[in-house]
Image: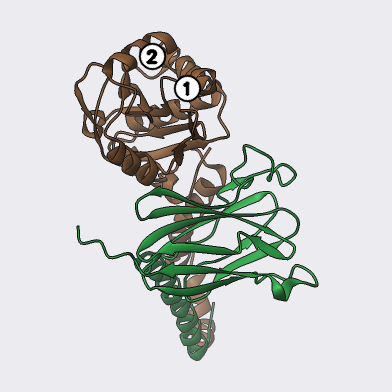
Amino acid sequence: MHIDRYEQIWIRISVAVLVIFMIGIVVAGWSLSIQVPGVYGRVDPNTVTEPGSPWAEPGLRELAPGKYEAYILAQIWTFVPGEIRVPAGSEVTFYVTSKDVQHGFRIQDTNLSFMVLPGQISKMTHRFEEPGEYVFVCHEYCGVGHHTMAGKLIVEEAVASNQ
Amino acid sequence: MGVQSLAQPKIEKEHRPGRINKAKVLYVLAGLPVVAILAFAIFRPIRVLPRIDLAPSYVFTDQDGQRFSSEDMRAKIVLYNFAYTHCGAACDDTFQVMRDVQARLGELDPESPEVHMVTISLDPERDGPEQLRAYAAQVGGGDNWHFITGPPQQLKNVVGGGFELFYESAEDGSIRFQPTLLLVDGWNILRAEYRGDLPTSEEMFEDVDLLATEAVKSKGVSRFAYEAAHLFLCYP
């Protein structure tokens, strides 16, 4: 089969670009430890707030010193709880699910961003080093009150302990 | 012939009979692995349990008052549950699954690593070796079943921070936590977790069986096949 010399060159260049980008994605994925949000687990949205479910009393729980888990329930048009306080340097694992429609969860100035679907649990972990106010917003259109759906995570200065 | 080959030398060359077309061979050679990889990823001939996370290391005390550490469980498959001796019927579900799994361990490959059961007591204040021994007799722990606990702060770090199980004491002396079963492999890697939503004994045994089979078979060349199964997320 005869292929024009210039066409051959361009075919090679386009294949090389694909290979380079593919390698780039894989290397970046590992070296920057990008977390791809996947399906962590499922939960029945009808019974998600009933006793026994961790979202019956959503909020922050201390697993161990410096390590927390936050159960957050997204519903129209608010997050429960709307405010979370953790000391600086703590690692927080978020478990978020929706009671009604599709929502989003994004904490500004962090790597955390995922969809929140009824029936599915989204899980992600982040270590908050810098004290300050981190606003979390819903970034999937969920109805007329969508723009008001936000909360904040306050990272407090760690109490000085000289031990 | 001479005139023709002068006019179209290239085509003439490629169609010469008896000569292997190098380009075609190259395409086939390059295509075979791609097809093989796709087939592996789609048909998933080997199933493995995911490598979820490293399990925590610990040094605790067992029901005989002996030092018991996660290092003692190296190269062994360990099924963990969490309880405390005053728990009563609320803790029965996980014990039932573990008893059923223990009763069926004889069905595993004879070369598979030892399978141990470990119950971690969340109530070190009240659960000393004596209480744990009595509890072991009561819930039916046999050989290879360890009942362990440790100082409260270490316990919080290992169970809360490491195994990510939240527990807290209530005012009436009970401890609130989700019934949890965790399966850890011989490299101290967490391979299966059931939190709140417990498996049937059958499902739990299948997980143990998958792990034992992997430990027996992923040696030599077939090790690469098992690593490929991990890479392509061939989970059950």
Q: Is residue B157 above or below residue B24?
A: above
Under mark 1, the amino acid is Cys
Residue B160, given in percent of the width and then of the height, sits at: 39, 43
Q: Residue at x 49, y 15 (%)?
A: B100
Look at 39% across and 27% down and name the residue there: B79
How would you rate the neighbour count of disc 2 (Cα within 10 Å): few for under 14, some for 14-19, many for 20 or more? some
- Seen from the viewer's position, the closer of residues B21 and B191 is B191
**Viewer-closest of B7 and A6:** A6
In the image, taking residue A52 as reference, residue B88 lies left or right, namely left
Residue B68 sits in quarter: top left
Question: Which color has been applied to chain A in this rendered view?
Answer: green
Q: Which mark is residue A46?
A: none
Quadrant of the rendered image containing residue B67: top left
**Residue B163 point in image, percent of width and height:** 39, 41
**A35 or A15: which is nearer to us?**
A35
Distance of mark 2 from mark 1, alpha carbons?
Answer: 10 Å
Name, please, the residue furthest toward the front.
Answer: B171
In which quarter of the view is residue B89 placed? top right
Question: Taking B23 as reference, is B88 above or below it?
Answer: above
Circle 1 is placed at which residue position?
B87
Q: Is residue B121 left or right of residue B28?
A: left
Residue A19 in view of the camera: yes
For the point 70% across and 74% down, the residue is A148
- Write down the colour of chain B: brown
Disc nearer the start of the sequence (2/1): 1
Residue under numbered circle 2: B135
Q: State the residue at coordinates (45%, 42%).
A: B166
